[in-house]
Image: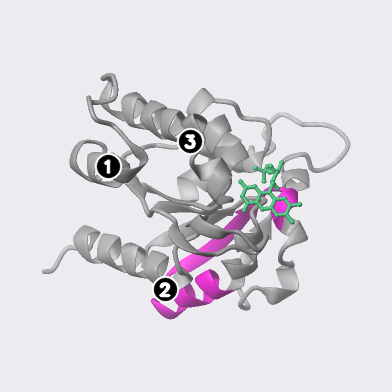
Amino acid sequence: MPRIIIGATGSVASVRVPALCSALVEQGHEVRVVATEPALYFFGADELPSGVKLHRDADEWPGDQYRRGDEVLHIELRRWADLLVVAPLDANTLGKFALGLCDNLLTCLFRAWDFGRPVVLAPAMNTMMWDKPATSRHLAQLWSDQTGRDAPAGWSLESAELHFAREAPALILVPPQSKRLACGDIGLGAMAEAGRIAEVVRDWAERSTPTD
Ligand SMILES: Cc1cc2nc3c(=O)[nH]c(=O)nc-3n(C[C@H](O)[C@H](O)[C@H](O)COP(=O)(O)O)c2cc1C
């Protein structure tokens, strides 16, 4: 069965990470979690299904000093995984992905990723954050990095999912949903339901598993 890494960032939607893990484990996947430090404000290792390993930034820097031959965790994780699911993807990490910044385990993993294997992106942020031009610009940059072209005329947050699916299928965008957010605001920005993200993973697994 495919091996999946869930990348969790500092959105309140990280409270759903244990549920997403459970759904993917139930599908039969081997699952690991790479969490940013802010993500760990929202869930703990003890909430993950048994057998699901949590990797955090400190795990990149074990011992007092690097010794030749020591493993480089983000590279080992890249080799291990068949799919990366960044859920929730907060505004900060989206911006880092778009700019190519890599100052923690998750952003190093994304920067080092082999896009022969897809990455699912499930953004989650306040509506006012989602609506800022930076969100569309950062998603467009990721699309351009995949295609080698400028974002198409008419690029928008609404059309982004379709553009990724058609022209940059290594990035699977699962758009946020509209609802009352944890902060009390009502609007677009809440992470898609864990069940919806699990469905997207199931579709990918079915497409990538040979039928005979
Ligand atoms: C309670 C709380 C909830 C937050 N929720 C979100 C969110 O849903 N989306 C978002 O983009 N940022 C959110 N933030 C801000 C991020 O945690 C902050 O930008 C952080 O630096 C992200 O770091 P990371 O991308 O390395 O995880 C929240 C912060 C707090 C304190």
On residue 195, the disc is 2
Residue 170 visible:
no
Residue 136 percent location from the top left of the image? 42, 34
Instruction: Check disc 1 and report the residue beneath it.
Output: 159
| Label 3 neighbour load within 10 Å: few <14, some 14-19, many 20+ | many
| Label 1 neighbour load within 10 Å: few <14, some 14-19, many 20+ | few
Q: Nearer the viewer, mark 1 or mark 2?
A: 1
Residue drawn at x 47%, y 45% as measured from the top left: 79
Placement of 149 over or under 112, stated as above or below: above
Q: CA distance from mark 3 to mark 1?
A: 13 Å
Going from N to C along the chain, the mark reached first, 1 or 2, is 1
Q: CA distance from mark 1 to mark 2?
A: 23 Å
Instruction: Check disc 3 and report the residue beneath it.
Output: 135
| Three-letter code, disc 3 | Thr
| Label 2 neighbour load within 10 Å: few <14, some 14-19, many 20+ | few
Left or right: 108 as drawn, with respect to 36: left
| Three-letter code, disc 2 | Gly
Quadrant in the picture for residue 107 = top right
Residue 31 in the magenta stretch? The answer is yes
Residue drawn at x 49%, y 43% as measured from the top left: 78
Left or right: 63 as drawn, with respect to 159: right
Residue 14 visible:
yes
Q: Which residue is situated farthest in the left direction here?
A: 212
Residue 161 percent location from the top left of the image? 30, 46
Residue drawn at x 51%, y 35% as measured from the top left: 132
Left or right: 20 as drawn, with respect to 160: right
Residue drawn at x 36%, y 68% as measured from the top left: 1
Magenta part of the chain: 19-39
Going from N to C along the chain, the mark reached first, 3 or 1, is 3
Q: Is the C-beta separation of discs 2 and 3 under 8 Å?
A: no
